[in-house]
Image: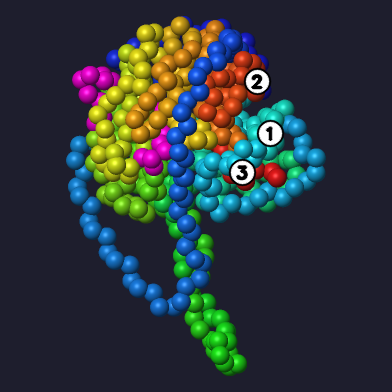
Amino acid sequence: MAKKAAPKSNSKTPAGTAKKAAPALAAAAKKPVATKATAVKAKTVSAPVAKKTAAKASSTKAKIVTAPAARKPAAAKASAPNTKTAASKPLKAPAARAKRLSAPALRHLPPGTKFFELSRLMVVAIDGGNKLVQKAQSGPNGPWAKAWAPIAAGTYALMATGLTRDGRVAVVAQPSAGPQLVFITEDANQVGPVEKWNAPVNIGAVPGATGYQSMSMARDTDGLIEIFVVTSVGQIWWIRQNPPKLVDKRVTITPPGTDKPITVTVQEQAPPDKPWSDWQQIPGGLVAISARRQGDGRIVLFGINSTLNLYRCQQSVARTTNAGEWTPWVMMNTPTTGTFIGMAPVLGPSGGLNFFGLTSNGQVVHTRQQPAGSESWTPWATPGFSRTGINTLASGIQGDNDIVLVASDHSLIHQFNAQNSARTQNWTGWRDFSQSDARVEFKLDYNADGRLMLFSHAAAVPAGGGLWAKRQTALDSTEWDIDWEQLADGGIRRFSVVRDLTPPS
């Protein structure tokens, strides 16, 4: 992996003319400088709300099956986004990996109980040599592996991460050689400390595409993966895993109250004839896209176009199978908010999506679904004003389901803003807690014990920047560790953080 050695980049992207969406993240590969956190009054802990996960249907049914009702034709699309073209510590003994059928719900546990969730954090990255690599905790809340490990052979240009139906890490990636995309998953049969991955599966290229500038992955109401990409010319395309099929099977049973066996026909689930759907185009044009699953399992898309306008659309029905079943795109920005350079959506404690946007003038604004799962969103509001404009933003939830925001401003001061109450939308306001000597990119996710972990990446270094992490000192705390833990001293071009729900036990 390449070492850090690149000078600080002074280039800036004008807010009104940028052709790529995403926070302006010019940076150098230098270690963040920590400042001592100040103890403050603890937040009021709101009552937890469990995250719901779609239950898997029974694998065996009686032969009598009612024909599914025909879907109503979807309404014609209305407005769409502007379509302008956008410029280790090894385990002590080998242990079998626990298998999850679905993601567990967050929950409060009695004092002294170690885990909120059986999971571990993993970082998936493209390194300075364009290799696809990963580094993970050795187990729930565990230490990080000492070395980065390969996921698949070859070199890659772009990737996104997510989870399979049973909680394993999944990666979609574009090889450097062309527009073909591959899908890679953790091997379900993990034994011992060495991470194993299934061979990449070619899911094809978007028709006519020569490359991609953004991609995102989300699970649908059945836990199946759906992938969304934006091509180099701004087109929006979508592909999804096909559901299992039902097949007839003859079985012999002995009914209760008799000793005479009979043969009946039942239906069982079997793998689909074709694992993935065809690529389908969603109308509109974007330069960045973010897919999120809302509380009822349907997927919502957020995107920024080449003129930095913000849009959203969502599945109008569960188990969407064609582009006509997505709602029309709705432009979200107003004359007051102006245009946007960053998106940080997160599922809130009420089951509704919360959208935090970074505006072109460096402020964070907030809107949320009300009620949860609907197409109705609250008016824009601010969780707190930043006197010095913000240039990077991340959102996450901690173990008690409260939302936490982390940002870095133009003075390179890092700040957090924690939600005290989802019901009243009461926030702590922006509080300084650290700093760096160059611009960074943030990502935020929670550990198995519910404490948040912040990842800081020096993003705009030609050979790839460094990567560091730090934790909350306790669940629901406004204190953070003073020290940063170095995960890479350089050589990280792109990275994503994902919670592996099948960690080594």
Q: Amino acid at mark 1?
A: Gly
User: In the image, which disc is placed on residue 118?
Assistant: 3
Q: Quadrant of the C terminus?
A: top right
Q: Amino acid at mark 2?
A: Glu
Residue 324, image x, y percentages: 27, 49
Q: Is residue 349 magenta?
A: yes
User: In the image, which disc is placed on residue 331?
Assistant: none
Q: Quadrant of the N terminus?
A: top right
Whichever of callouts 1 and 3 sits on the residue coming sooner in the sequence is 3
Q: Magenta region: which residues?
A: 331-352
Residue labelled with disc 2: 485
Q: How is the image coloured?
A: rainbow
Dot 2 crowding, Cα within 10 Å, few <14, some 14–19, many 20+: some
Q: Quadrant of residue 344?
A: top left
Q: Which of the pair 59/185 is nearer the observer?
A: 59
Q: Which of the pair 416/234 is nearer the observer?
A: 416
Against 454, residue 255 (above or below) is below
Does residue 148 show up?
Answer: yes
Q: Amino acid at mark 3?
A: Leu
Q: Quadrant of residue 213?
A: top left
Q: Secondary structure at mark 3?
A: loop
Residue 17, image x, y percentages: 30, 15
Residue drawn at point x = 60 percent, y = 24 percent: 473
Residue labelled with disc 1: 142
